[in-house]
Image: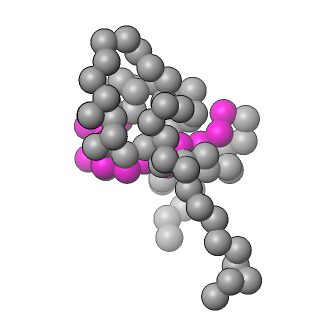
Amino acid sequence: MMPREDVTSVTFSATKDEVLVIMGETGFSRIPVLSDDDPNHVVGLAYLKKLVRATTKRKQKLKHFVTETFYIPESKK
């Protein structure tokens, strides 16, 4: 586990190009996407492969490329 402050993440309102720059700088191929309203709520994951495959000329919001995350309650072991 890492402290939350050390985790590289992006907000849901980020554009595809902004996320690609962050991925290039950090070297990560998957980055958690956080809610704009609540930084403790993970909306999904941004995958490098999915972002690179989407070759569009206009800036698109990240919501088109986010993969939903699944939560497992702690009571399920």
Kindly indicate the quadrant of the structure image that contains residue 26: top left
Q: Residue at x 31, y 49 (%)?
A: 28
Indicate whether 25 appears above or below 69: above
Q: Residue at x 33, y 40 (%)?
A: 50
Q: Pinpoint residue 18: horizontal percent, then vertical percent.
A: 39, 26
Q: Residue at x 68, y 83 (%)?
A: 76
Q: Residue at x 39, y 32 (%)?
A: 19
Q: Pinpoint residue 52: horizontal percent, then vertical percent.
A: 26, 34
Span shown in magenta: 21-36
Q: Quadrant of the C terminus?
A: bottom right
Instruction: Give left or right: position of 6 versus 12.
Output: left
Q: Pinpoint residue 30: horizontal percent, then vertical percent.
A: 37, 50
Instruction: Give left or right: position of 46 versus 35.
Output: left
Kindly indicate the quadrant of the structure image that contains residue 65: top left
- Outermost residue on the top side: it is 58
Could you tell me if residue 62 is visible in this image?
yes
Indicate the colouring scheme: one colour
